Amino acid sequence: AEEEETELRALLLARACEASELQQVRKLSASLLARLPPAPLLDDAIDSVRTALAPLLHGGGGGVGVGLAGAGPAVATAGAPSCLAGPLGLFYLCCVVSLHRAAAASVTCELGASLVSAACAEPRDAAAAQLQAGCRDCIARLVCAGVREETA
């Protein structure tokens, strides 16, 4: 079963990272990937999103790295590929925190303050605004996960 899960994860990552794929298909792949146990990708996805948020948090020059360029299947088995940074990475984390309580606690501890700061920053361009919308969505899902935890 673990081998099948690894193969499925690699296939879903390859589809999510395929730059020529429609965005809806990439998002579907990320949401299906989030249904698998998040442990193999969670820490790397958090780090990738934190890196993508850095320009918003620190006012760095240039545009925000949105992480939509394809990383290809070669990285599908090692950590979180670059396609899980930016908006797609935030979408993946939103799905993960909605489905896995322990992941919600981890994302809150590791990324919560950065999400709030990025969501409140002044957007510089369309890519930054998209990233901020993802931050707000992720914050809302983290709050919902916290409420579910308290009422369980």
Image (cartoon, rainbow, N blue to C red):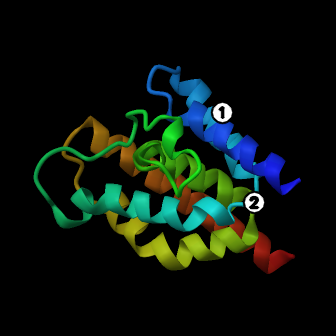
Q: Is residue 107 left or right of residue 33?
A: left
Hey, which quadrant is residue 68 in on the image?
top left
Tell me the kind of residue under disc 1.
Leu
Residue drawn at x 40%, y 48% as measured from the top left:
86
Q: Position of residue 75 (x, y in %)?
A: 50, 46
Q: CA distance from mark 2 to mark 1?
A: 16 Å
Q: Mark 2 is on which residue type?
A: Pro
Assign the C terminus to one quadrant of the image.
Answer: bottom right
Q: Viewer-proximal residue, 59 or 143?
A: 59
Badge 1: few (under 14), some or many (20 or more) residues near its Cα, within 10 Å?
A: some
Q: Is residue 47 above or below residue 82?
A: below
Task: Please indicate whether residue 20 sits to the left or right of residue 107 in the image.
Answer: left
Find residue 102 and report its image quarter: bottom right
* Nearer to me, 60 or 38: 38
Q: Is residue 130 above or below residue 110?
A: above
Q: What's the residue at 48%, 48% (across, down)?
A: 84
Q: Which residue position holds label 2?
A: 37
Which of pointers 2 and 1 lies earlier in the amino acid sequence?
Answer: 1
- Picture residue at 34% right of the left edge, 67% below the top: 117
Check residue 66 in the rendering and tell me which mark sits there, or answer none.
none
> In what element is the residue under mark 2?
loop
- Left or right: 1, with 98 as reference point: right
Q: Where does the image place residue 37, in percent across and percent down from the top left?
A: 75, 60
Which label was assigned to residue 28?
1
For discs 2 and 1, the disc positioned in front in the rendered view? 2
As drawn, which residue projects farthest toward the left? 61
